[in-house]
């Protein structure tokens, strides 16, 4: 690869934290319901360190994808700050925002919806290069072929349309597009959820190889912990617009502090049938509550197996504080209890 | 893994890549494969040729002038007295009038859509893409416009500006853009939420490029169909205006006018109604075949 492919030299000297999310809120007002709003992201604070893969997990509707769109500045925040490589992106607009986006790309959830059906694969992958005026026309075409090869596709497929590819191949095209401008940070918004299990493994391996090769930082969003475990260095668990626990990958699996994390972990099936039969999964009652009117106190208390209601859990909101292992934070009044 | 491969120093096989085909070239291939669409296109080209050549044919004496009245041959049937399509109540040759009528009718249809398209696209795209206050403003304006009865609106405009070609074109276009603007807005609203638009935004596409390269091509199908179907309806509206006496003034023939003139004598002399009506019908059919063909041709998901 060319020198440009290597991580920027500044990475060595600068802040180890590439992205900081500081108390970010995103409320979607419901039209015609005076003041009511869906509180999709409700006070999230996160850090992503350079070169790591942070896994973000949670049920459908917990605000993961919204958070991804806030971080990539596809949506404006309601309040709070997002700081990427020392620059506050929440205040950027227009040309500055476009320049910043070059370093931060996204891989989307649905490989059938994320590629423009009227553009050829070559044009799709070349688009970011065109947008940032990288290289001459011929260099761009070479780069497109190189990228196709990199993600394991035939470089002669540039003139085909997205509908001529399978889901896994399309996701590879999406990855090639994200890599085109040599970003330092990639948000994978459920990048494998829409794929078959066997294809999921291939894509995850590809993402890992690419991370090693290009020193990428990932925010890897998924709704199940099994997928995330393979790829992440650290994991954050979200529930109803808030982060309830963050920890190193092994700590989260071995010593989950938050009862919600424990419930999520126990929902992962074990491949050994005897173990699977013997274990007693923690089943959560009911559905995820409405994000328009979240429960008082701890948001999880309505479904929590260890909540004391009435009591502190329904009255006071727990803060994200150190519990358990080093670098482990949990937002629970009774963190660690079973 | 592909990563293990050495750098691509050796000549990249761009040359041997599959033959490069652009969207339009690709569309042309698909269009040619659609027989009805090609037939429609042939009919339209034929009509346009007729429209252009009819004065020449009169000059060469191949057909009679559309305004020549032959008192001895009033309301003769098709094929009689040397009139292939018969004559009307004033003894004018129906074929010649049809050929000259195509000049006005086609240009009303096509030029009006030519005026409507940019107005409808601009307003619809702006309202749909920018949303919020701009959308509200543009759409309320459109609603108010829409609330006027078309015909009365056209009548008022034509009576103010006089029944000349320009004011008729303008008036028909001014009532026609509303539907297109709404359609375009709806399309844009639906497409704007797609992930590939987000993907284009996050790969740094500026707004104008988003609109022209992603939103517009994906919204094109229904827009083309609407525009193409708008052509016959403009032809009809001109006919209604002629009937009411504020359209193109006689003796200049238009198809609509011929239908309305002939219909009083529909039993005595059916040919003077049937032939212009058929002309309108075939033109409509030809345009709609072409419209369908274009819509399919511009969608790469359709098989060639």
Image (spheres, coloured by chain):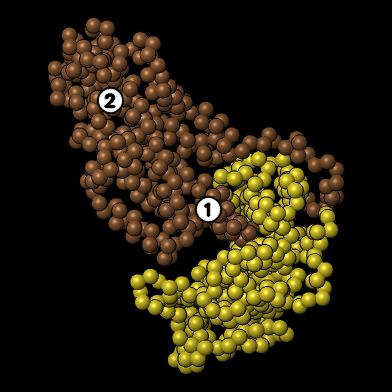
Chain colours: A yellow, B brown
Instruction: Tell whether B55 sits left or right of A321.
Output: left
User: Residue at (78%, 50%) from the top-left corner?
Assistant: B2
A254 in relation to B279, above or below: below
Q: In this view, does A219 lie to the left or right of B67?
A: right
Element under disc 1: helix
Could you tell me if residue A10 is visible in this image? yes
* x and y, in percent, of residue B227 in the image: 40, 40
- Looking at the image, is mark 1 or mark 2 nearer the viewer? 2
Q: In this view of the protein, which residue sits in the foreground, B252 or B83? A: B252
In this rendering, position of residue B12 left or right of residue A29:
right
Asked whether the residues under marks 1 and 2 belong to the same chain, the reply is yes
Give the residue at mark 1: B211
Q: Residues within 10 Å of mark 1 (few under 14, many from 20)?
A: some
> From mark 1 to mark 2, how far is it between C-alphas?
42 Å
Residue A269 screen position, x and y as percent: 61, 66
Q: Is residue B162 left or right of residue B14?
A: left
Q: Is mark 2 on a helix, strand or loop?
A: loop
Which x, y percent locates residue A106? 64, 62
Quickly name the residue at label 2. B253
How far from the left and from the top, in percent, is residue B133? 41, 65
Give the mark nearer the N terminus: 1 vs 2: 1
Indicate which disc residue A205 carries: none
Of B204 and A237, nearer the camera is B204
**Circle 2 crowding by C-alpha within 10 Å: few under 14, some 14–19, many from 20:** many
Classify the position of the C terminus of chain A by image quarter.
bottom right
């Amino acid at each position: 690869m060319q020198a440009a492919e290597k991580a920027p030299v500044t990475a060595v000297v600068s802040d180890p934290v590439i992205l900081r999310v500081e108390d970010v809120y995103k409320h979607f007002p419901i039209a015609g319901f005076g003041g009511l709003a869906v509180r999709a992201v409700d006070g999230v604070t996160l850090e992503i360190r350079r070169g790591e893969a942070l896994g973000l997990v949670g049920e459908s509707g917990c605000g993961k994808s919204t958070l991804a769109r806030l971080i990539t500045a596809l949506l404006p925040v309601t309040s709070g700050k997002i700081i990427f490589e020392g620059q506050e992106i929440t205040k950027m607009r227009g040309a500055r925002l476009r320049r910043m986006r070059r370093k931060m790309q996204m891989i989307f959830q649905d490989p059938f919806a994320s590629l423009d059906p009227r553009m050829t694969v070559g044009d799709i992958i070349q688009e970011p290069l065109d947008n940032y005026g990288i290289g001459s026309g011929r260099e761009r075409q070479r780069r497109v072929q190189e990228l196709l090869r990199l993600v394991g596709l035939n470089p002669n497929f540039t003139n085909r349309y997205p509908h001529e590819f399978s889901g896994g191949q399309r996701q590879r095209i999406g990855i090639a597009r994200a890599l085109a401008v040599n970003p330092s940070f990639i948000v994978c918004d459920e990048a494998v959820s829409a794929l078959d299990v066997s294809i999921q493994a291939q894509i995850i391996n590809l993402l890992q190889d690419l991370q090693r090769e290009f020193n990428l930082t990932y925010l890897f969003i998924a709704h199940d912990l099994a997928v995330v475990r393979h790829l992440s260095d650290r994991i954050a668990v979200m529930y109803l617009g808030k982060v309830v626990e963050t920890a190193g990958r092994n700590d989260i699996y071995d010593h989950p502090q938050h009862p919600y994390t424990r419930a999520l972990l126990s929902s992962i099936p074990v491949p050994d049938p005897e173990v699977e039969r013997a274990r007693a999964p923690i089943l959560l009652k009911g559905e995820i509550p409405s994000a328009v009117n979240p429960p008082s106190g701890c948001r999880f208390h309505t479904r929590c197996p260890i909540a004391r209601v009435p009591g502190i859990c329904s009255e006071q909101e727990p803060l994200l504080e150190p519990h358990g292992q080093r670098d482990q934070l949990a937002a629970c009044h009774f963190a660690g209890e079973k | 893994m592909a990563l293990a491969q050495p750098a691509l120093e050796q000549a990249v096989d761009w040359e041997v890549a599959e033959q490069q085909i652009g969207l339009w070239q690709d569309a042309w291939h698909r269009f040619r494969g659609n027989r009805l669409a090609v037939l429609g296109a042939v009919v339209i080209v034929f009509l346009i040729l007729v429209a252009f050549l009819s004065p020449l044919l009169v000059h060469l004496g191949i057909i009679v002038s559309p305004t020549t009245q032959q008192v001895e041959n009033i309301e003769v049937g098709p094929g009689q007295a040397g009139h292939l399509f018969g004559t009307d109540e004033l003894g004018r040759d129906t074929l010649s009038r049809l050929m000259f009528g195509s000049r006005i009718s086609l240009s009303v249809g096509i030029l009006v859509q030519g005026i409507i398209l940019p107005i409808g696209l601009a307003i619809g795209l702006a309202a749909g893409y920018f949303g919020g206050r701009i959308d509200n403003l543009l759409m309320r304006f459109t609603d108010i416009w829409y609330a006027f009865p078309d015909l009365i609106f056209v009548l008022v405009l034509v009576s103010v500006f006089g029944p000349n070609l320009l004011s008729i074109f303008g008036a028909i276009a001014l009532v026609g853009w509303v539907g297109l603007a709404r359609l375009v807005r709806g399309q844009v609203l639906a497409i704007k939420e797609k992930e590939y638009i987000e993907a284009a935004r996050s790969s740094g596409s500026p707004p104008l490029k988003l609109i022209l390269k992603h939103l517009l091509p994906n919204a094109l199908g229904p827009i083309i169909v609407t525009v193409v179907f708008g052509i016959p309806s403009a032809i009809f509206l001109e006919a209604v205006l002629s009937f009411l006496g504020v359209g193109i003034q006689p003796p200049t023939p238009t198809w609509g006018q011929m239908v309305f003139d002939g219909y009083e004598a529909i039993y005595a002399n059916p040919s003077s109604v049937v032939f212009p009506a058929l002309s309108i019908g075939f033109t409509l059919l030809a345009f709609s075949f072409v419209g369908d063909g274009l819509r399919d041709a511009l969608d790469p998901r359709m098989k060639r």
